[in-house]
Amino acid sequence: MAYVIDTECYPNYWLFAAKDTKTGAIVTSELREGGELAPKDIRRILINRTSIGFNSNHYDLPMIMAALQGFDVRRLKKLSDALILSNTPSWKLCQEFEVDTYDRGKHIDLIEVAPGMTSLKLYGGRLNAPLMQDLPFDPDLLLTDEQIDTLREYCVNDLGATLLLFNKLKPQIELRQAMSNQYGVDLRSKSDAQIAEAVIRKELTEVTGKKYFPAKLPSDYSFHYKIPSCLKFQSPDLNALLKRIGETKFTLSDKGSVQLPEWLKKERIKVRGIEYQMGIGGLHSCEQRQHIVADRTRIIVDMDVVSYYPNLILTLGLNPPGMGDEFLITYQSIVDRRVKAKKMGDKVIADTFKIVCNSSFGKFGSRFSFLYAPSLLLQVTLTGQLYLLMLIERLEEANISIKSANTDGIVAFCPVHRQNTMRNIAWEWMLDTGLELEESHYRSLSSRDVNNYLAVKTDGKTKGKGIFAEPSLAKNPNGSIVYEAVAKHIADGISLEETIGNCDDITKFCTVRRVTGGATWNDAYLGKAIRFYQSKTVPEMEVIRYKRNGNKVPDSEACRPLMNLGDADIGDVNRAHYIQKAKELLAEIGYVEEKTNA
């Protein structure tokens, strides 16, 4: 049995609330000024049950422990303000306030597991929570009995949002539980990158017996990129670029992250007329408005590098400072075990090591990690980008056009009669770099830009990125019916009018947005996370506004807020607006109805 938990704190009132994840039963315990706390239910849930919260390791658990220790409401409020308003770590504040530590073996904090690091309210909006609701009263207000009743309802609604998030993240939680059992370390409340760090640290320590700490680099630390021996270009311009990169002295920001020099940020690299740009995050092409279709004369081929960054770490032999070959031996072992588990169909083990392999690289750039090695981070990212440019140049020289490139792959528009040439070039590139390419074929590729595209595979399935990606916890909904209609039109020839006209799910017409300082509509306060749709009955000049300055919230003209899905009226949706937006998007990507090559 498990419970989602939450707490609220005001100068004269503190509330603990919990919800059974199976039955939905609510348990509450409260403390009022001059009163006493009944701790029995709280202790039962924390000791005998799994508890689940959001940002709870930092806030709710210290507050609960302080309440159980006998803090009165005024002292609880001081602790609450310190936890919320100061930048001091919660463990240090617990020391200052003399709050006992809590064995968190039965607790899961979802904030690191969920992608994007946003608010619980926005996650609720992304999950179509029935009610999106902001804190109803200023946190410094002395509450009346009636206001306490309202606050209790608000807290219970937050429990519902936490439960929605927990249910959505169950596969990730279950995998983390399996990994925790395997390594004897509680990983359930950790992000992918934190898991990778914990696993590698544990495996290294078991091999070497050493303790590992973040590297301390001097304030004037600088370094140069080391050009791999296999990295060579044919073009004088690309060779000049490579030479300049090798001569550049790279430095760190005040926060310890690698600073890309201004000249490289602004550099537009041209290969056969197509522009590319480099960055810390990866290479990307600079195309706009593109729609291409495979036919009898040309095919569309997506070439992705398999586990690009992990394999670059291994092929380049990159060891963080002070670790020597033990790091690479351990890292290679993890990669090998993942491959073996994948072949044997052991999904849990394969997914475990996938997280470790793919997420450890980012810790090279975190000065708080024992893997901190900014020079290695740059060595990986720049090499990855330059390797892709080397592949692009070779293919373009063979008259195989590259239509897109992004971080770990490219899309080629290849004449049918040059398929063997393309594969020979790819094979030679793999031999030179020690990396592996995977191919997939598309019927069509429609792009607004490199980060927003829809690819239709040869089997009719679609692959989308950015605005065309499936709804997820990582992004706010923004009239997803528009992108669904465009995808169905391109992939299956279904009219925009049919998809949009037949949709009865009002959440697909909704936009969810974070509004700094909160939003109002018709002078009514909505909250800092809002949900709205285009209405047939709201006047065009009526808008949702920022509370603090009265400015218009973007794209909110003629929109009706829908903070409570119970108030939904699908008949009020202005479907013509969404059909028009879909038509505009088709025009933005240069879609041609006859499906001729663009």
Image (cartoon, helix red, strand yellow):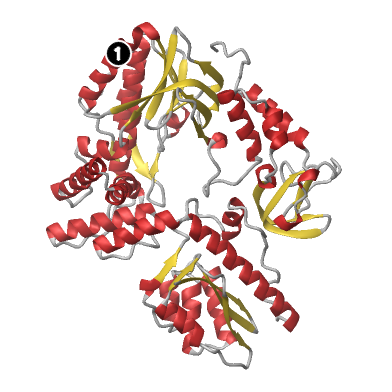
SS type, badge 1 = loop
Where in the figure is residue 447, as x and y percent of width and height?
54, 25
Within the image, what quadrant is residue 418 found in?
Answer: top left
- The structure residue drawn at horizontal position 61% and vertical position 25%, both measured from the top left corner, is 489
Q: In the image, what residue type sits under mark 1?
A: Gln
Where in the figure is residue 97, as x and y percent of width and height?
46, 82
Number of residues whose C-alpha sits closer than 10 Å to that of mark 1, classed few (under 14), some (14–19) or many (20 or more)? few
Report which residue position mark 1 lands on.
234
Residue 422 in the image: above or below residue 306: above
Residue 40 in the image: above or below residue 377: below
Residue 295 in the image: above or below residue 501: above
Between residues 465 and 57, which one lies in front from this camera angle?
A: 465
Between residues 379 and 559, which one lies in front from this camera angle?
A: 559
In the rendered image, is residue 97 in sight? no
Within the image, what quadrant is residue 7 found in?
Answer: bottom right
- The structure residue drawn at horizontal position 37% and vertical position 31%, both measured from the top left corner, is 408
> Number of numbered discs present?
1
- The structure residue drawn at horizontal position 56% and vertical position 58%, both measured from the top left corner, is 119
- The structure residue drawn at horizontal position 30% and vertical position 11%, both measured from the top left corner, is 420
Within the image, what quadrant is residue 310 found in?
Answer: top left
Where in the figure is residue 511, as x and y percent of width and height?
67, 45
Where in the figure is residue 40, as x and y percent of width and height?
49, 88
